[in-house]
Amino acid sequence: MNSFQDTFHLLCVFHTALSLQHVRWCTISEEEQTKCNDMSAAFTDADILPNVLCVKGGSAINCTHMIKNNLADAVTLDGGTIYQAGKEHNLKPVVGEVYDQEIGTSYYAVAVVRKNSFISINNLKGVKSCHTSINRTAGWNVPVGYLIDSGRMSVMGCNVPKAVSEYFNASCVPGANNVNYSESLCQLCKGDASGQDKCERNSKEQYYDYSGAFRCLAEGAGDVAFVKHSTVFENTDGQTPSSWAQQLHSSDFQLLCRDGSTAEVTDWRKCHLARVPAHAVVVRPDTNGSLIFQMLKQGQQRFQMFDSAAYSAKNLLFKDSTTELVPIPNQNYQAWLGDEYMHAMRGLSCDPSRLPESLRWCVVLTEEIWKCSEMAVAFKRKNLKPKIQCVSAKTAEHCMEMTQKKESDAVNLDGVDIYTAGKKYGLVPAAGESYSADDHSNMYYAVALVKRNTSGAFTINDLKGKKSCHTGYGRMAGWNIPVGVLIKKDIIRPTDCNIPQAVSDFFSASCVPAAKMDNYPSKLCALCIGDNSGNNKCDASIQEHYYSYSGAFRCLVENSGDVAFVKHSTVFENTDGNSNDSWALHLQSSDFQLLCPNGARAEVTQFAQCHLAQVPAQVVMVHPDTNIFAVYGLLDKAQDFFGNDSNGNGFKMFDSSDFQGTDLIFKDSTVKIVPVGEKTTYAEWLGNEYIESLEGMQSPQCSGTAAISVNIAVLLLASVLLIRFCSS
């Protein structure tokens, strides 16, 4: 039986060989074309099928286009080009190179520093850097791509070299002596013995290549060197005759790990920036990879495939350091490259030539259109790219639809709108908001705030009959979450799912801006005060003094209400001299406390332990084809000019008071725009518990009810609650 299977397999291979009469190998240089022709002749003499024909591609990128268009069949590519070929043309790797039996088809890109330098991957900004060369894998592509993808380095206008020059204090990047590049990229370079050929991309520059980048670090020119895992060992402990390295010991250096820690240089398997895949032969999806491997395996015995010395060049067709070729079992580019390398390449995918001239920002409210127009003018004045163009829509969901259709490019959303934008319209997060200078978790806390009262203190279980202050009807921290928590705890019990009526029956009186509707109980607006003349009472605008976060807090401060449902930062923004509003001038944060779901009270500083729910921050959502690094790069650079109220540049990104509104485009409480990091989908941004709340945690009182008197989306939002509250 086995003999029959073997024979059948050989017949299949032979049949495929006949059907694929030749393999058109794509070459990228004249020397490679010459070597390819010699390889073809050697294969023919040995009757190796299919025949190899050599076609000129001129460059690796051009070869990938030719293979896609059936003008060529195969080419050997490095990791970065494999990424592009797979992503853009669906080409697949089928045969991999092996350089070292110990680590197989890969090596590791590492960041090396002197021991006890107090440098970590988290504080690289402002240090001096040593690179093997521009656009080299371990020395440039991986570290720069990793820093961009992780959000540590922002890139405006996809100008990666400029971003690197602004991130590091000074660098040596051989080959970056282009007139379009910043001089700081070559500032640390040494040149040859006489100081000539400084920053050249060849061995005349003493800081070129792996050993050169390490020498740049060892001699104190730079603080960090981006090299491969073996570089330190090859240049220390007497392993090289080079005079500059004679006294160096590997134990005097350490590696920077992705988690912020450091490790011994021997721990490169665990502590590295990325595992770098070996070069691989790529072909079209319909090409038989096994056939290509069998052809090359036989060819190895007939032709010096891994030696280019005879052609006065290096690494022709295959890398000269290759020891053998191996078949790639899982023939897709993602599996071959690996997650670490894929993420680094994603960070480098910011291509200036593919950026739109303007980023069309979708806004809804008239006040937002006004602020967006001012933002566009302010950004243009500082030459920020891409330029902002404002487009208006009727609703947030209309903005999502326009972005899906590529009629707009970006819209800032929160809560359930993020869920809808991601699940229904396929949009992805590009840049988030942070509401605390030391908060990198991209969320805020919904809290129940009360006055400190030693005589008449009450808990969350004693809220019935109290007076309540809310930011607005349907708002996350002010309505959806607190009402959902009280329903989940069976404190509020809706009848026939009529939540507004249930809230009205529970509290003795409330101010819920935007709840002034014909079929809603009037008690929901009873505490509202409107503007200075008493007009616009219960409106969802700043004309209602008790609207939004500060308004709900003011409702509590002025004794209109007993509890205010706000976010954790509201009390700090309006006390201890942080607000110039007359009603808040003499307030102290210590005069207030939080109500915890477990029935306790806590200090306002303990919001991380005592809150109703964690709420994902607002996030800028874009079409998946839009480069998220360009969007974050624009906003990160913009906040340098317009993110601080005292910047003196006129426009304020995180302040809506000049436009007679609140939380326009960005929340006013935003401290900074932050990268999304690994949270590149709506589900990752929102988190599983939050999504489960939206999708599955309906109030038990409403199960099986046919008549629903409120919009189902509002009902779902009103049920927002982390699972742990059920057991509290």
Image (tube, helix red, strand yellow):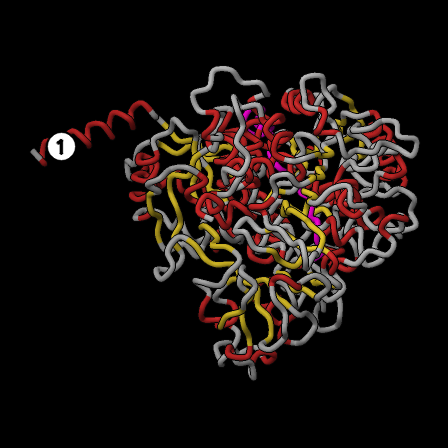
Percent of width and height locating residue 504? 64, 30
Range of the magenta residues?
420-437
Please name whichever residue, 52 or 112, is drawn nearer the observer in this view of the structure. 112
Residue 111 picture quarter: bottom right
Q: Is residue 397 left or right of residue 680?
A: right
Give the quarter of the figure containing the N terminus: top left
Please name whichever residue, 296 or 128, is drawn nearer the observer in this view of the structure. 128
Q: Which residue is mark 1?
A: 5
Percent of width and height locating residue 70? 47, 24
* Residue 160 shows in the view: no
Q: Is residue 362 left or right of residue 344?
A: right
Q: Give the farthest residue toward the front.
A: 455
Queried whether the magenta region covers residue 232, the answer comes back as no
Under mark 1, the amino acid is Gln
Q: Is residue 554 left or right of residue 10?
A: right
Q: Using a 10 Å C-alpha cutoff, classify the residue at mark 1 as few (fewer than 14 neighbours), some (14 to 19) or many (20 or more).
A: few
* Residue 415 shows in the view: yes
Q: Residue at x 50, y 70 (%)?
A: 263
Q: SS of the residue at dot 1?
A: helix
Q: Residue at x 73, y 30 (%)?
A: 356
Percent of width and height locating residue 291? 31, 34
Q: Is residue 142 above or below residue 387?
A: below
